[in-house]
Image (cartoon, helix red, strand yellow):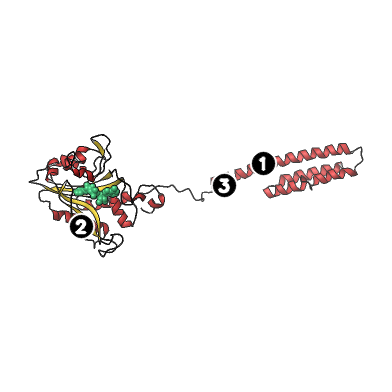
């Protein structure tokens, strides 16, 4: 019996040392330590030993059991450690594994549209300027021919910060900012930027949106120049076959004032869902700079005249990309934003 115990101990420890996969370790455990394993058979064999030897042999078998269990636990730990270090060293040397691509982001649809608009006007000799988003009542309204209590102020629902400071409702105050330092020299500028209006958000209107203001002042600027500039813009932005029309309108800072319509890009003027059956799409407000505004900008209206326009880049991007709700622009949903680059 003692020989059997020793032989089992030697064989079990030797095999344990050789077990170098998770499956081999489990097979070893089943064959020696499980209920039907060899240690238990050895224990059952005690019945055949002489009664006086049984306690001693039983103790020996128990010692063997403890040593095999400890050996198994130690081998299992070593195996785990080897496996981890094999994985780490594989990681260190496997330069062929794909990297984690950085996410560099992309330009917003509004930025892409603004850049295209600026490029087109730049091609016509317009300089790009910026003017403040936080404006004074004086620049946003008064200098644009809207004194306090002028009813035309109601056309722009306004976020007032104090009684005389507000978030600009349009980019038109930029006309004054551009004219004052330049007067009385001829001037050709566009002014892109953000505007704010205290109005209900709908599929067509945001409370925060962009505009691009255009202004040209010189000795002989006429309504034909305005039409030529805007038609050239429409053709470069929407396609060579485009045509535009002027519709009489009212802005306190232009005289005459017009709404600028372009023939529908989808139905080419026949009438469809996009143009609501009219055949025309509104793309800007415009007009000849009001003499009062020229004066406020430091120009003599007898010697200078000017053209001005203001357009919404989101509405332009909506037309080109068939986006039917302006709220997609600033709700930060990547499913929408990542479609444009
Ligand atoms: C103006 O703001 C005038 N300052 C435009 C102008 C400039 C006229 C120079 C004459 C000379 P209007 O409120 O129509 O006009 O706005 C101009 C454009 O801004 C609109 O055609 C539209 O494209 C865009 N816009 C106006 N309100 C919103 C809004 N809530 N959300 C998105 N776009 C808007």
Q: Which of labels 2 and 1 is toward the front?
A: 2
| Residue 170 point in image, percent of width and height | 24, 45
Q: CA distance from mark 2 to mark 3?
A: 64 Å
**Can you identify the residue that label 3 sits on?**
90
Which residue shows up at 80% across the image and 46% down it? 38
Q: In the drawing, what numbered circle is on residue 231? A: 2
Q: CA distance from mark 2 to mark 1?
A: 79 Å
Q: Which of labels 3 and 1 is toward the front?
A: 1
Which one is nearer the viewer's eye here, 242 or 40?
A: 242
Please tell me how crowded label 2 is: few (under 14), some (14-19), or many (20+) other residues with Cα within 10 Å: many
Q: Earlier in the sequence, mark 3 or mark 1?
A: 1
Dividing the picture into quarters, in which one does residue 16 lie? top right
**Can you identify the residue that label 1 sits on?**
78
Contact? badges 2 and 1 (CB < 8 Å): no
| Residue 83 point in image, percent of width and height | 62, 45
Q: In the rendered image, is residue 291 in sight? A: yes
Q: CA distance from mark 3 to mark 1?
A: 18 Å
Contact? badges 2 and 3 (CB < 8 Å): no
Kindly give the residue lying farthest to the left in the view shown: 302
**Image quarter in which the N terminus is found:** top right
Q: Earlier in the sequence, mark 2 or mark 3?
A: 3
| Residue 280 point in image, percent of width and height | 24, 60
- SS at badge 2: helix
- SS at badge 1: helix
Please tell me how crowded label 3 is: few (under 14), some (14-19), or many (20+) other residues with Cα within 10 Å: few
Which residue shows up at 55% across the image and 46% down it? 91
Which residue shows up at 19% across the image and 45% down it? 152
Q: In the rendered image, is residue 118 in sight? A: no
- SS at badge 3: helix
Q: Is residue 101 above or below residue 56?
A: below
């Amino acid at each position: 019996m003692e020989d059997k115990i020793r032989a089992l101990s030697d064989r079990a420890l030797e095999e344990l040392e050789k077990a170098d996969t998770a499956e081999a370790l489990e097979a070893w455990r089943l064959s020696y330590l499980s209920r039907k394993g060899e240690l238990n058979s050895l224990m059952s064999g005690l019945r055949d030993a002489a009664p006086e030897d049984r306690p001693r042999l039983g103790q020996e078998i128990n010692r063997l059991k403890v040593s095999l269990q400890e050996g198994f636990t130690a081998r299992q730990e070593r195996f785990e450690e080897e496996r981890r270090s094999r994985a780490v060293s594989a990681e260190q040397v496997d330069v062929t594994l794909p990297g984690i691509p950085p996410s560099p982001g992309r330009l917003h649809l509004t930025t892409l549209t603004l850049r295209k608009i600026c490029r087109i006007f730049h091609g016509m000799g317009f300089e790009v300027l910026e003017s403040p988003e936080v404006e004074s009542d004086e620049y946003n309204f008064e200098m644009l021919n809207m004194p306090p209590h002028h009813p035309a102020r109601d056309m722009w629902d306004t976020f007032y910060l104090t009684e005389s400071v507000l978030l600009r409702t349009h980019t038109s105050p930029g006309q004054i900012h551009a004219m004052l330092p330049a007067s009385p020299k001829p001037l050709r500028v566009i002014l892109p930027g953000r505007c704010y209006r205290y109005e209900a958000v709908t599929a067509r209107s945001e409370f925060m949106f962009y505009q691009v203001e255009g202004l040209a002042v010189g000795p002989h600027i006429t309504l034909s120049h305005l039409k030529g500039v805007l038609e050239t813009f429409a053709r470069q932005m929407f396609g060579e076959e485009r045509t535009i029309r002027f519709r009489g309108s009212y802005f306190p800072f232009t005289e005459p004032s017009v709404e600028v319509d372009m023939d529908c890009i989808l139905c080419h003027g026949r009438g469809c869902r996009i143009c609501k059956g009219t055949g025309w799409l509104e793309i800007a407000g415009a007009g000849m700079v009001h003499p009062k505004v020229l004066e406020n900008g430091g120009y003599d209206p007898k010697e200078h005249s000017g053209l001005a326009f203001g357009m919404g880049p989101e509405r332009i991007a909506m037309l080109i990309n068939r986006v039917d709700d302006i709220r997609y622009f600033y709700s930060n949903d990547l499913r929408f934003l990542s479609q444009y680059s």
